[in-house]
Structures are given as C-alpha cells and as structure tokens.
Amino acid sequence: MNISSPMTRRRYLALTAAAAVSTALGTFPLNAAERKKPLIPKRVLGRTGVEVPILGFGTFPLSVHYRNRDDEAVQMLQHGIDLGITYIDTATSYGAGWAQSMVGRAIKNRRKEVFVATKIYGTFTYDEIMRNLEGTLERLQTDYIDLLYIHKLQSVEEADAFGKKGAILDTYYKLREQKVARFIGVSAHGDPIPVTLFIERHDLDCVLLALNAAMQGVVYDTGINSFKNDPTSRPSFETIALPAALKKNMGILAMKVSAQGQLIGSAPEKADIHTLLRYAWSLPITSSMVGMTSIAEIEQNVAWASAFQAMPPNEMRELSDRLSFANKLAIDSYFANHNDIC
C-alpha cells in the first residue's frame, strides 16, 4: 500500500494502530497512572548523561494541522507524554511560537517528566537571541530549556561566523553556564560539511542531523550513463557528521527519517515508515524526532518503538543502497534549497 498521501496514511494508521499496539504492548491500560509507565526504550544522550526515549515528538506538523484547535493539540502532546514520548522538539518558528505555547500548556504541571529542546537561528543578533529566548521561556511556562540548538547551520561561512568571539556560540556558552539552557547543540539539514566542521571545532553537547536510509552518496558513472552507489565519493551526514559527533560523545538526534515523506511508498525505490524508523533507530543515535498529527499515529509509533529490534547491518546496507540510488540527489537538492522552518 502506498501511504505517501496524507489521506492514505491516515487510513493506514487508523486500520493498523490498534493491532500493532496490542501486539507490541498488550492492551493499553485505562488507568492514568498506568499509562504513565515508560513503554519506549531509552538511551543515554551522549555526554549529557540524560536518558531519553528513542522516539521524540516533533511539533512542527502540529503547527500546520492544528492551528485554532489548541485543546486537541495539547491533548495529543499529553497523550504522547503518557505513553513515554517525553522528549519534545520545538522552535519559535513553528507557527510563530504557537507550537511552543501548546507544549507549555501540555507540560505545565509535569515539567520534570519531559526533556524540551528548542532552536534559535544563528544569524540572530545578541538582542534578538535574548528576546527570542525570553518569549520561548514564557510560552513554554518554564525557567529553563533542556537543550538549545543553533537552528539550521547551512554553510561553511556560517560555521566560521557562528563560532567567532561575540557571535551566537559565545551567547550559548553563557546561557549554559547560567543553566538557562542545560545543554547546547546545533542542527543541520542540507550540507553535512559545515556541521561536521562545527562539531569538530566547538564544545557542544548535542547535534540534530538529517539521517535517513537514502543519505548514502551516489556518483555518476559514465560507463553506465547513470548513477551508482559510492558513499566515499559524496559525503552524507551518516558518513561524516555522525562519526565526528560520536568521537566527541555528543548526544545525537535524528530528523527527516522519511525525508519529509519523500521516501514513503510501495515502489521499489521507496519504503514504509516503520522500516525507515527502524533504520534510523539502528544507527548509533539516541533518538529520532517524528512529527505526529493523530492519536492513531502516536500510538502506532509508540508500538513500533516499544517493539524495536535493531536492523542487521546487511539489511541496512541493502535498504540504503536501494533508496539512495533513486532518491539521494533529489533529496539533497530539496534540503539544500527549501525554506525549512523545522
């Protein structure tokens, strides 16, 4: 079944969620206290020492699908927390602060249960950073952030500029010292080279990377007049940024595991979302950020996470070879050029 379209995906999830959840977890308990028992495996977030679930709640899709439906959005976030999705990823740019406000409502009386990450663009001035942070803390109804990212590092020039004395990284160091942000990090979507340099040069706790099965490199072969797989000739986040982060014992978070839906489908060059999640969880990462827009989707992802078994290396290579051959160039172009606000 091709589940790339929103309607088909909703129908697919609605039909399969109950069965999958029952198989992986048994029948969901009705008692609220029972629902709060951890169901999802946890991993240590690198040098931070904090344990977080392998499934994180990415809140950007909520800002697209649930604007003006605040109570429903809050209920979904709370349901996710009840089921063990206690890592929540957000940013001011998600609905111009709306997603942060929904997170704030959801965690108001359970702040100690959750790990909240948010992001600020590295191009902001000091005053803009502080205004952004002040608004973020107010909307989240908290006095600290667990993890504060420099949002969307894109170029070598930015990597050089953001690390200069008096630039955003200096501000982040101070915020960490003051414990306004417990930990600091950087996110990157398009080019893996700038973030790799940034990781190697600076004292960061965590990194959020676009990691999916199609990010292996491909190279044009004139002999066959087509592309062939060659991960050494074209760098990817998995081949250069991930090892750099591991070397420094950073907490590593994955995003774009389905390349924003581009990899989902039933054709030979596509895969289902469960397989794509399993691939990401089989990498040496801590957690994968997943956008969820229905109760069925939340429960399905919880079931998959709870029943997770690592994908064998040969199966990972086969999947990466198959998907990267058909998809990687298009995905690289998309993430390099789209106006990303997540």
Image (cartoon, rainbow, N blue to C red):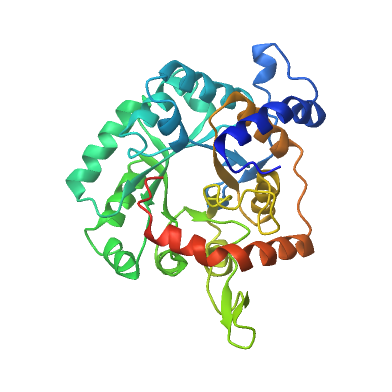
Residue displayed at 64% across by 13% down: 32
- Left or right, 325 with reference to 193: right
Decide which of 198, 273 is in the foreground and name it. Answer: 273
| Quarter residue 230 falls in | bottom right
- Left or right, 227 with reference to 145: right
Residue 130 appears at what percent x and percent y?
A: 23, 41
Residue displayed at 71% across by 42% down: 1
Residue 26 appears at what percent x and percent y?
A: 80, 24
Residue 224 visible here = yes
Decide which of 114, 255 is in the foreground and name it. Answer: 255
Residue displayed at 45% across by 29% down: 65
**Vertical position of residue 54 compared to residue 108: above or below:** below
- Left or right, 154 with reference to 270: left
Residue 84 visible here = no
Decide which of 329, 118 is in the foreground and name it. Answer: 329
Quadrant of the image for the C terminus?
top left
Q: Identify the residue at the far top of this view.
A: 31
| Quarter residue 292 falls in | top right
Residue 250 appears at what percent x and percent y?
A: 53, 56
Decide which of 200, 13 is in the foreground and name it. Answer: 13
Residue displayed at 44% across by 58% down: 335
Q: Identify the residue at the far left of this view.
A: 127
**Number of marks:** 0
Residue 2 appears at what percent x and percent y?
A: 66, 44
